[in-house]
């Protein structure tokens, strides 16, 4: 038997090896603490960044129980099933030799997805926020946590489980950063400013859990 964290760890080892970086096994996470908030903000807002939303589940049965958490799942499914190619449930299943294998499907449309092709399914930042806003309003109609096209709103304390949903940023077909959805929602793009580069900043020093692959040049964002 395995757990959700085992599924996440297996996903990292097989499909995001640059994130499995020599930490002790119990400390290896998809979004380990890095503390480089400026680079994280640059990566989130880079013009060619595509965003993927992943929830890890122990098994297909756990996937089905997740969907029952919506106050009105059918309404959410009808509204979002045509735009959920980037929103994936990754879960474990036993192979013939009882080894852990991974499978993935889209959240609402329930289409099987080949895991190694997940990086082709991302949405642009603006489109990602539009979808995320709708998703959170369906799942937490009384809890806030939505987002608008300019920047995500911070989730309220009564929304649980956001730390178990992972946002992965894809640049040029490769994973470049990952963080929990709760940490992603903690970022705010500063208002105003000039054409100079203005990075996003977390609302508090503890607000980010980011792992960036080393890049020759950092991704930058400019504001007009």
Image (cartoon, rainbow, N blue to C red):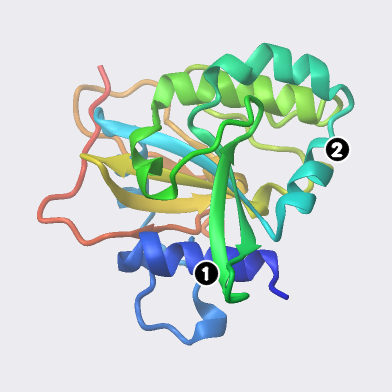
Q: Can residue 186 be seen in the rendering of this structure? A: no
Disc on res. 69: 2
Q: Which of 196 and 145 is in front in this view?
A: 145
What residue does disc 1 label? 9
Q: Which residue is at a point 48% across and 62% down the rendered structure image? A: 11
Q: Which residue is at a point 52% across and 69% down the rendered structure image? A: 9
Q: In which quarter of the image is residue 214?
A: bottom left
Q: Which of 115 and 26 is in front in this view?
A: 115
Tell me if residue 122 comes above or below residue 209 in the rendering. above
Q: Which residue is at a point 17% across and 56% down the rendered structure image? A: 215
**First of labels 1, 2 by sequence position:** 1
Tell me if residue 173 comes above or below residue 29 in the rendering. above
Side of 175 relative to 111 (left or right)? left
Q: Can residue 64 be seen in the rendering of this structure? A: yes
Q: Where is residue 197 in the image (x, y as percent from the top left)?
A: 22, 34
Q: Which residue is at a point 52% across and 24% down the rendered structure image? A: 129
Kindly report the distance in space between the C-alpha atoms of the residues bearing marks 1 and 2: 25 Å
Side of 183 relative to 11 (left or right)? right
Q: Where is residue 58 in the image (x, y as percent from the top left)?
A: 70, 61
Circle 2: element type: loop
């Amino acid at each position: 038997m395995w757990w959700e964290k085992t599924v996440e760890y297996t996903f990292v080892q097989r499909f995001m090896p640059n994130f499995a970086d020599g930490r002790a096994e119990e400390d290896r996470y998809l979004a380990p603490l890095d503390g480089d908030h400026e680079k994280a903000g640059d990566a989130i807002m880079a013009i060619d960044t595509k965003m993927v939303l992943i929830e890890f589940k122990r098994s297909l049965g756990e996937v089905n129980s997740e969907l029952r958490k919506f106050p009105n799942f059918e309404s959410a499914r009808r509204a979002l099933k045509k735009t959920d190619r980037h929103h994936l449930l990754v879960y474990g299943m036993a192979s013939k030799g009882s080894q852990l294998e991974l499978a993935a499907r889209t959240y609402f449309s329930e289409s099987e997805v080949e895991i190694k092709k997940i990086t082709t399914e991302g949405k642009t930042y603006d489109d990602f926020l539009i979808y995320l806003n709708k998703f959170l309003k369906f799942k937490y109609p009384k809890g806030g946590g939505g987002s608008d096209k300019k920047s995500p709103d911070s989730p309220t304390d009564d929304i649980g489980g956001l730390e178990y949903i992972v946002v992965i940023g894809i640049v040029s077909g490769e994973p470049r950063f990952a963080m929990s959805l709760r940490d992603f929602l903690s970022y705010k793009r500063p208002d105003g400013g000039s054409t100079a580069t203005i990075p996003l900043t977390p609302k508090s020093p503890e607000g980010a859990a980011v792992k960036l692959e080393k890049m020759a040049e950092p991704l930058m964002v400019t504001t007009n």
